[in-house]
Image (tube, rainbow, N blue to C red):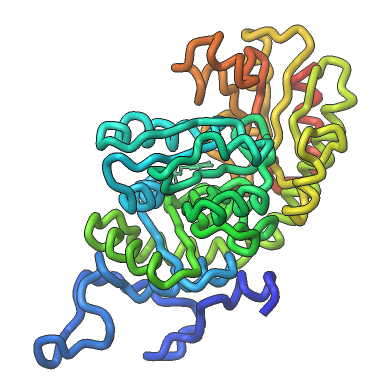
Amino acid sequence: MKFNTKTIHGGQEPDKAYGAVMQPIYQTTTYAQSTPGGHKGFEYSRTHNPTRSALERAFASLENGEYGLAFGSGLASIDAVMKLLKPGDEVISTNDLYGGTYRLFKQVFEKFGIKFHFIGMENAADIEQYVNQNTKLIWVETPTNPMLHIIDIQAIAEVSKKHNVLLAVDNTFATPYLQRPLDLGADIVMHSATKYLGGHSDVVMGALVVKDKELADKLYFIQNASGAVCGPQDSFLMLRGIKTLHVRMQRHCENGKKVAEYLAKHPKVEKVYWPGFEDHPNHEVAKKQMRDFGGMLSFTTKNNDYSEAIKIVERLQIFTLAESLGGVESLAGHPASMTHASIPKEEREKTGVVDSLIRLSIGIEDIEDIIADLEQAIG
Ligand SMILES: *Cc1c(COP(=O)(O)O)cnc(C)c1O
């Protein structure tokens, strides 16, 4: 099956009971047994639920993996990966991380004796100096948020394999439409399915996909033992969202390119961060590992003025000023006053999050309306 067909049919077949073409919502916690242990593969819905199982197969199919797992949020899925580790283990992670992932690593798992190294990974060779016998996991996000750095997954996978360390990739920004980390050598792919996979800003959910049976069994054990699963209603909505992933992504990419090109020519814009530009530092890697360049971009204005940036995002009409990304609607955010507000100014500026940085998640509205909105807001 090719990718577009997988979004519609991957892991799914008509319901066995009545032939329902869409996966029914099995709103049940438990399942009748004819004799103790005599069940049809389902005992209790924390462990398994038929709607969630269909979704988990769909996740696996999209990422060219063997085993999928669905969780109550993206962070719950990362939490499950971290529980593969034990005190004394070390993790090497990208430094331009989603804020919630950084918080989970620093404020929850550091307490349990896990050591984190946050480093730039644009150059894969830089990782080697942080690897020692305690290193158990490399955590990669690409493209990164909000600076749209690109990291070479295949090059990192060579390092992880050489040292027998697990490689996990947060594939939220790219989606399997654009990039499939397991094909590039990663062991675990993770999603905040809340974003592009669901695609309609109506479900919070996380996903993991792996190829290896032993690793899958450990993760299924944690999923059931810790219990951060998603419900059948949300699983149904996610399955429905995924069916249009390929058409949505195609339009996100088309619109993203047009907005990037429009902003790059705007007299008030200083810099546009978008991996499709030839002068993006890792443009060649993006071209190699991604099918297209996605619908996420960030930009700064020439005077780099904090209050002017806030005025721009307040003036937007088609774009909604909001956290999150990846929905059909265009969203705008001002990291310095929103997602990165708690980080001291000097610290955030070191990573490029300057006062005027605005992050856009380009939706699938008519491009003329999107650009006209930016035109009136930037002035
Ligand atoms: C949103 C997001 C997460 C966290 O996912 P939730 O579903 O909000 O828990 C993790 N990584 C990235 C890149 C995200 O954008």
In this rendering, the answer to whether 308 lies above or below 230 is above
Residue 109 in picture, x, y percent from top left: 31, 37
Left or right of 258, for residue 360: left
Q: Residue at x 41, y 48 (%)?
A: 136
Image spot of residue 233 (x, y percent): 37, 63
**Towards the viewer: 301 or 128:** 128
Q: Is residue 217 left or right of residue 56?
A: left
- Is residue 49 found left or right of 260 in the rendered image? left
Image quarter hosting the N terminus: bottom right
Is 120 on the left-hand or right-hand side of 366? Answer: left
Where residue 346 appears, as percent x and y from the top left, is 55, 9
Q: Residue furthest front?
A: 133
The quadrant of the image that shows the C terminus is: top right
Residue shown at the point (87%, 37%) measured from the top left: 278
Q: Nearer the viewer, residue 134 or 241?
A: 134
Q: Residue at x 54, y 69 (%)?
A: 65
Q: Please indicate, yes or no, whether residue 86 appears anywhere in the rendered image.
A: yes
Q: Nearer the viewer, residue 349 or 267?
A: 349
Residue at x 21%, y 77% (from the top left corner): 43
Q: Residue 63 falls in which quadrant of the image?
A: bottom right
Q: Give above or below for 70 relative to 205.
A: below
Which residue occupies the foreground of this view, 267 or 66? 66
Q: At which x and y percent is residue 240?
A: 53, 66
Residue 55 seen in this snapshot: no
Query: Which quadrant holds residue 46?
Result: bottom left
Q: How many marks?
A: 0
- Image position of 2 with respect to 146: above or below: below
